[in-house]
Image (tube, grey):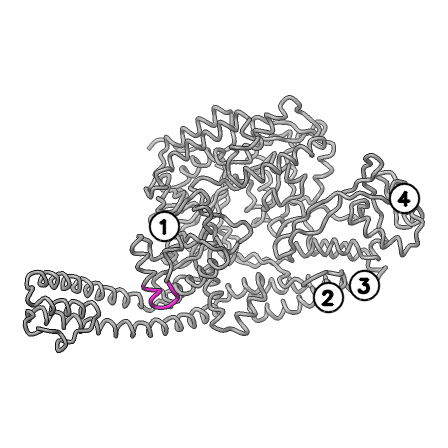
Amino acid sequence: MSRTFLFERRNHVPSSDLMQIKHGFYQELLAYCEERKGFNQRKELLQQRLSERIEQEPEVRIAYIRLQQGVRKGRIQPGKIPKANRVAPALMAEALSLEQTGSGLLERHQELTIRFKNECQMQEQELYKLFRQQPSVQNALLLTNYEMYCSLNKSYSSKKSGKVWKMMMRSFAKTAPLSSFTSICRGPGTGGESRISFAQWILLHWYELWLLLPEVIRASRYKVEYREQEGTLLTEGSTGPQAAEPGLYIRTKRSYRLKMPAAAKIQPGSIVTLDELALIWNESLEAMTAKAVQLVRCGYLKNTIHRESGPLTLEVFIETVSEFRPGSSRIQSLAQHLEAIRLLSGQIELTHEVAQRERLLEIAQKHVNRCCEWLGWEGRYPANPFNEDSYTDAPAGPSLEVEVEPLRDPLAEWAEVLPVFDNRLKFRLYMEHHLHDTLPVAYASLQPSLSRYAAEYEQHVALNRTCRGSVFENAPAVAHLEELRDQYRMKLAAAASGEDVALERADLASLKAGLQALHIRQPATAGFWLQQSGAGELVLNDCKNSYLAYSMYHLPESHEAIAERIKEVLHCGEEAQLITYSPSCGFNPNMNGFAEGSSLAAELRDAVLIWNAERTSFELQSGEQRVVPLYTGTLAPACLPEEYRNLALLTQSGFLTGTGLDYDELAVDECLHIGRISYGKLILHRRQTILHAKLFAGVTPDFDGYLRLHELLETYHVPLHSFVRLFPVRYNRLHIEYGESGLHKPIFLDAEEPQYCMEWLKHRERCRRQHGELAVVFEEALPDPYDNEYTTEFVYEMHKEPLRRGG
């Protein structure tokens, strides 16, 4: 039996700390509501009896009418009621008693209004105090958002209470998947530690700016690249990052037309120096240096400075820069600042004391700013230069393997039908159908058409999660896969009406038989993001085809074993070569030992594309060698450079959507209940209640709004503990706003607590002002974060193993 890789992600704030903020105000509210409910029932009965007396005693009609009006207004003045002496004494006594009860309830309401305000203030202070006392949260915020760290720690005011609330809720409880404020347990014997790395997106930008420094331009050799078309020289260069922000660095390319006659004097592929260029261009060395910068940017010149393949790390950048030290005091100073940053990152890694980390980070930021100055960084300098991975010791008690063991079979069975939900598989099946008569074919010759199909896939299939209405549905296998998915969707139909749906083994067997009929033999490998409920169920947050990417990143000491495991998972065979790539255009998780930088580009030039029916995937053939490419980064293919995006779509899968009901297919008028979807004890989709924002009209962030919110929750049977998401409503359907990362993130709402309710109502109102019509999705808190000391999530990277039958 081969080993499975299992991790535990644990949020930083323990439930016992949050329980200290619960003071029982909700119990006072329940008592008040019960009294008010009894009062309203008495009032309704009295009004009914008075109406009967109006009809039964016409001679005293005026007295009962005035008494009824007084009951309705809550103010009875017997002396001003005509014929009051003829009203039945029991009715008058009941009316006066009701008035007294109403006055008491009004006083109680006023007292609770004051208590509510005080409770909110007390909980705000206690939550902020708890935030300041949590070193794990402080450390995480210090490195991920230094400006917010300073804002909340050095100049706090009640106006910032919403930020503290969201920070603490995400550090305490979050789902699908857990937040970045998480420590990872890698299993017994791995121990706890902190791993600090410099932000790769900054390094990438620095590297490009460094290549354009005059000293580097003058000392470099260049490869000339262009193609000629009807007398015009065409080149392809980078247009700069689409977005330069922490964690993301995406480059795009554009074509340039060169009108400089001297450019055509050098054959493509030639290696030249700046002196040779100056001679050919008939320019001074100074003028040629400035011109070379433009030629590099448009792609005519490619700097041949050697850099080891693999991710660009701070160490690699220092080595590259240091080679140019002798020729420039500026570069020498740059290298010194880089080395200081490396030393400081190591010191930050060795200390967990927040104040000391803050001091080290402030010093490091000064060195980062000087590097930006030397390199000509335009715009605001980056404030968060470091990334951290926080690891914790294995918890006491049974191992994670033992806890998941009873559910290994249903997980394996579920993994066998995952190709039904794999839209990239449909892309591959269509391309095999489209290229069938031409294979094998030179990969380089396919790039233009592959790019066209890849763009159409991203715009239609990836967005809409279906091939229908696109060119891809023309392949018979793709059409059959869509039918299989429709078959599955029919099983879920009852969930959209609020019913729980329990899938049976026969349902999965039917899907599996459909895949076998299509000769899809994808191995049952998967990565599952799971949470365990108190009743022993496993709740599925996310799933994807497993290439052990999580293990690659978090177990660097096991790279060799993991590489062998991947070859086994992918059925490469002894004769195939596995080539991993993770081009330097993404964020920190790309920085693992399997990244090969741009070295794969050379492999693609002379390779031919072939189809491996056993793997239902394309491969490359280089001479006599079969090549299986494996993208080991975590960015979606759409974010990769064109040649790598196409390759990833042809050869790999990613996150598998559609196992439950998708948000953007749900229509909501006022209220919609979604049932739970399960397979045995594997929960695929939590129960949900979706309320239109119009129901929240008048629900204000005060005591009356708190009362109204609880009336809504009770009316629509919403649990007091929920994960809450917000979605804009467009054409009566939920709409996903891509790029609005903070909008759809689940926030845990404990509706018992006044401060939590007020902050959530303010958050909802801010989003309503920004996005217009909204729907509020209340998702059952399964598992409930209060049920365990820490909210945890398992990352379970599995490999197909023989299933145990019988019993």
User: Mark 2, mark 1: which one is toward the viewer?
Assistant: 1
Please say if 619 is above or below 334: above
The residues bearing labels 4 and 2 have C-alpha atoms spaced at a distance of 38 Å
Residue at x-position 59% and y-position 70%: 356
Mark 2 touching mark 1, by CB under 8 A?
Answer: no
- In the rendered image, residue 362, in percent from the top left (x then y), is placed at 64, 69
Query: Is residue 702 inside the magenta stretch?
Result: yes
Element at label 2: helix
Left or right of 234: which side holds 175?
A: left
Please say if 67 is above or below 511: below
Q: What residue is pinned by disc 1? A: 670
Residue type for callout 3: Arg
Mark 1 touching mark 3, by CB under 8 A?
Answer: no
Q: Earlier in the sequence, mark 4 or mark 1?
A: 4
Mark 4 touching mark 1, by CB under 8 A?
Answer: no
When asked about the image quadrant of residue 329, the answer is bottom right
The residues bearing labels 3 and 2 have C-alpha atoms spaced at a distance of 11 Å
Element at label 4: helix
Sort mark 3 into few (<14), some (14-19) or many (20+) by Cα contacts within 10 Å. some
Farthest residue to the bottom: give it: 79
Q: What residue is pinned by disc 2? A: 370
Tell me where the magenta segment starts and ends, as one range.
699-707
Left or right of 97: which side holds 471?
A: right
Sort mark 4 into few (<14), some (14-19) or many (20+) by Cα contacts within 10 Å. few
Q: What residue is pinned by disc 3? A: 330
User: Mark 4, mark 1: which one is toward the viewer?
Assistant: 1
Q: Earlier in the sequence, mark 3 or mark 2?
A: 3
Element at label 3: helix
Q: Earlier in the sequence, mark 4 or mark 3?
A: 4
Seen from the viewer's position, the closer of residues 693 and 568 is: 693
- In the rendered image, residue 299, in percent from the top left (x then y), is placed at 78, 45
Q: Which mark is residue 262?
A: 4
